[in-house]
Amino acid sequence: MKRIIIISALILTALTGSAAPAQKSGDVEPFDRGLGESLTGTFVPKGTIGAGINFSYNTVDLGGSADDMGYSMLFGLVGGLKGSMYTFGVTPQVSYFVADNLSIGLRFGYKRSFLGLNSASLSISDDIGFNISDYNVFNHKYTGALTMRYYMSLAHSKRFGVFVEARIKGGYGQGKTWKVVGEDKYGTYSTSLEAALNFVPGICIFATDNIAVEVAIGVLGLEYSKVDQYKNQVEHSRMTTSGANFRINPLSIELGTCIYFYTGPHSKKARKNQVK
């Protein structure tokens, strides 16, 4: 009986001793998601110079055919539309990589738009409606921004990557609306100032070693704007707006092309010298 008790005690002690090390917190392997490895990969090396441009142009012409009754929209609610509209925008940019995957840069933008509405009618009901004719709107704006961008490779790829860009932006714009009635011209002139801090994520795809296509969209920003308006060069009014937003804005989608020039040990000249 004593032998059975002693053998049972020894077995229990051995089992307890083997399980004890697993209970120590120091022996538990820490959880690692593996994000550090993808962040440390070089997608664009230090010393690279990037230069690119975004460009957009759109035109609309309504009721331009001979004996045209005018275009209708919204199930006939708006009819008799005759006029034209165009928008034009160009944004060149340049950047320098102060470290692997990290760049600072400058952006300059110009945007211009015009709407000339020869005629239009709005019919709410059989008894309520009104007409518009000879109404014109013109706007143009200059912007500049200081940028900082960080790239990350997708699945250690050298071709596909994502980035997030911070922009400190300022802008100045002018606009005017006018209407001609007989020989008289009535209009409003306005000037605008704006400042913003925006965060813009995007995707970068290298078609070749040096040329990439980039798509970006603004999702977060702090914005301030001030508009001064002068009606018939006499009456003055001012509007200021400010706020923060966190939303996807489809109107802020940017599509552009960027060329990367590798310098220092990553240039083609350095590679040729290494081969020699």
Image (cartoon, helix red, strand yellow):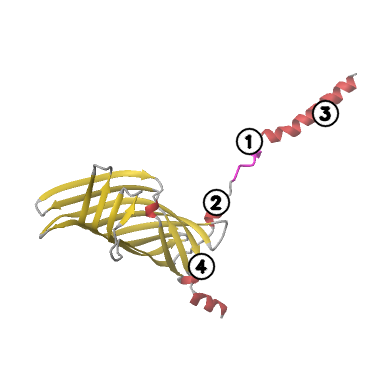
- Given this view, does label 1 or label 4 mark the residue nearer the observer? 4
What is the x, y in percent for residue 15? 78, 30
- Given this view, does label 2 or label 1 mark the residue nearer the observer? 2
**Distance in Å between CA atoms under marks 2 and 1:** 23 Å
Where residue 15 is drawn, which disc sits there? none
Can residue 109 be seen in the rendering of this structure?
A: no
Looking at the figure, which quarter contains the C terminus?
bottom right
Image vertical order of residue 227 relative to residue 90, above or below: above
Looking at the figure, which quarter contains the N terminus?
top right
Front residue of this view, candidates 126 and 245: 126
What is the x, y in percent for residue 248? 41, 48
Q: Amino acid at mark 1?
A: Ser
The boundaries of the magenta stretch are 26-32
The prevailing secondary structure element of the residues shown in magenta is loop
Specify which label sits upstream in the sequence, 3 or 2. 3
Residue 129 figure quarter: top left
